[in-house]
Image: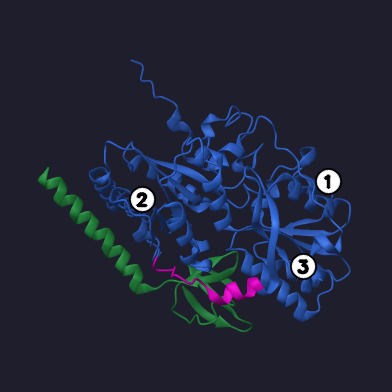
Chain colours: A green, B blue
Amino acid sequence: MLVELRADERAVVNLGGIRKDVSIELVPEAQVGDYVIVHVGHAIGMIDPEEAERTLALFGEMAEAAAAAGAAA
Amino acid sequence: MKYIDEFRDGDVARKIGERLRTEADPARQYSFMEFCGGHTHAISRYGVRELLPPNVRMIHGPGCPVCVLPIGRVDMAIKLALERGAIVCTYGDTMRVPASDNLSLTRAKARGGDIRMVYSATDALTVARDNPGREVVFFAIGFETTTPPTALAILRAQREGLANFSVLCCHVLTPSAITHILESPEVRRYGTVPIDGFVGPAHVSIVIGSGPYEHFAEEYRKPVVIAGFEPLDVMQAILMLVRQVNEGRAHVENEFSRAVDRDGNLGAQQKVSEVFELRPTFEWRGLGEVPYSALKIRPAFAQFDAERRFGLGYTPVADNKACECGAILRGVKQPTDCKIFGTVCTPENPVGSCMVSSEGACAAHYAYGRFKDIPVKVSA
């Protein structure tokens, strides 16, 4: 998660407690609070929280469907 | 960590596995290639293979940047350090790739070469700024994920007028490698490598988007599902591939929609095309010469191109005969088919490139799977 914007298109990200200085030149729109994907010291993309929830919900449906199938069998 | 832990939930993984067993048709075989080394690593590390039904098989692809780097390219970097006195900066994994004369960048460093491991292309720029009297070369490797940072480094060097910095560019392209595999005789003619679909790359797709894969789906009738690097992402993508095959569909679907859209990172693509152009051909370890599969630095940035600057030529070098990396990278063989796997060739002392990086098929199997090959005997 991006925790601090710095000069020269750089930012500090917090990776599970580890703070790291990365470049945000490739995602100049990134703001504090955004989740960025970091590759070789550069943020290359951002996580869309709504899409992440949607994917997790898909897994959830899967789990229910599997449970239902298991109960039917 | 948010957006990581919830994508590693073992109970959910087992449930997706149950779903897969319900939906996979027992009368048929499914073979899917995970192109990307990050997926190879996830499949081995999290035991994804054990959760799949026996008729769903995963084939490792060539998407491990270090694995596909041919010996001749590493030789060029070693030559720059040992014969031309340059400081060579490179990513950690590249250091141990076996080269000619029993050398690697690590061993060349032991012989006195000034070779430095960097985390980022930006760090190589810092080395150049700190050593104005020396030539500093960034040995740049990788797919579409590491290319934009290299482009930024060159653009910055130009802005700063950094006269002692150059790049040995070995950046390669994912779509052309996929085309090459689909056109290979093993897939097209002999059918020895049956591929029913692809798990598409995660980080590469963040940069290039899902659009470039549409061609494979349409032209070759192969479904592609782009997946994140976590185990649930991979499981879900495999389920989506099974469904496409069952329904006779061949589309590009995106499981990794939390980070990938159709267009990708347009800003990053613009930087890349500003600095790089296509190479007519490039040698890949395992795949041989692949047309239009790599990038070189545009003439406008010639002073930052180490190949031009030092007049370097490329000499192809054959791999060690005992090593099966080539066949493994084409999906023809598995690590355990190699006679020297785990005996002569280990992560501590790799003979082939697939044993070097944690994303390599051999290193992944060595780290997470090799004891499963040995039958357990219980004696009374």
Image check: B151 left or right of B144?
A: right
- The dot on residue B111 is 1
- Residue at image point 65% right, 62% down: B119
Can you identify the residue that label 3 sits on? Answer: B127
- Residue at image point 24% right, 56% down: A62
Image check: A28 left or right of A66?
A: right
Dot in front, 3 or 2: 2
Q: Residue at the far left: name it.
A: A72
Can you identify the residue that label 2 sits on? Answer: B238
Q: Is residue B271 magenta?
A: yes
Whole-angstrom CA distance, mark 3 to mark 1, is: 21 Å
Q: Earlier in the sequence, mark 3 or mark 1?
A: 1
Q: Quadrant of the C terminus of chain B?
A: top left
Q: Which residues are magenta?
A: B257-273
Q: Amino acid at mark 3?
A: Val
Image check: A30 left or right of B249?
A: right
On screen, residue B45 above or below B146: above
The percent position of residue B261, horizontal first and vertical second, equals: 43, 70
Residue B218 falls in image quadrant: bottom left
Q: Are marks 1 and 2 on the same chain?
A: yes
| Number of numbered discs visible in the structure rendering | 3
Whole-angstrom CA distance, mark 1 to mark 2, is: 47 Å
Q: Amino acid at mark 2?
A: Ile
Q: Residue at the far bottom: name it.
A: A7
Q: Earlier in the sequence, mark 3 or mark 2?
A: 3
